[in-house]
Image: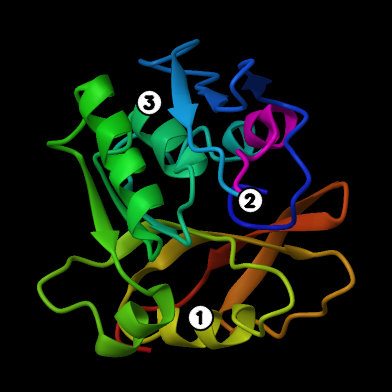
Amino acid sequence: MTRRRSTSRSRSGTRSPQGSGRLRIIGGEFRRRLLPVLDSPGLRPTPDRVRETLFNWLAAATPGARVLDLFAGTGALGLEALSRGAATALFVERDGQVARALGNNLDTLGATERGRVHDGDALALLAAGPVGLAPFTLAFLDPPFRQGLAEPCCERLEQGWLTPDAWIYLETETALEVRVPTTWSLHREVRAGDSTGRLYRRLTAPGI
């Protein structure tokens, strides 16, 4: 829902007469700010209701978090995290035009010191390893539907990308049964339309 799905439009954002979208930040420092969203097929913000539910679950974990937003698209989840006190956010988006728009929105919010956009493929980045990056405490993973990306990304996140007690939000088509690492424990889940979001907690001891 944050990323590319189909040509359907979000029911949560607003539309201008020219067809460009708007993303609304719903809580925190940037609350009620409206940001432009490209009129790109299938690109739509995660609905307000889902974001509000998710960040209620993450209320204690978001302040000071180091966030990884994979398949970032509009950046709705990562931007919401920054608004609610996350220390840093790395947005990964392979569509150059969408990545530039996301960078512009970070600049509009005055959040470029805390937020950075990586213009590239998420799976390739994960495969290369977190060179020079501290492990992330919170990861958002919302790959395009029906491309077989969810399980490989989950597996590669285990290769040094996450802290031992990280939170991971995974959003997939409802019909898909994803095998996640055994170190992930399901905390909550939410369904909206044709997608289901699952919040996991990584429970490992250092060195395991």
- The segment highlighted magenta reads 42-53
Q: Quadrant of residue 194?
A: bottom right
Q: Looking at the rendering, in which quadrant would you find the C terminus?
A: bottom left
Q: Residue at x 59, y 81 (%)?
A: 149
Q: CA distance from mark 2 to mark 1?
A: 23 Å
Q: Which amino acid type is shown beneath numbered disc 2? A: Pro
Q: Residues within 10 Å of mark 2 (few under 14, many from 20)?
A: few
Q: Is residue 143 left or right of residue 205?
A: right
> Disc number at residue 41?
2
Left or right: where 201 falls relative to 95 = right
Could you tell me if residue 67 is visible in this image? Answer: no
Magenta highlight on residue 196:
no
Camera-side residue of 174 and 94: 94
Question: Which element carries disc 1, helix, strand or loop?
Answer: helix
The amino acid sitting under disc 3 is Ser
- The residue that disc 1 covers is 153
**Is 179 placed left or right of 168 in the picture?**
right
Colouring used for the render: rainbow
Q: Is residue 144 left or right of residue 37?
A: right
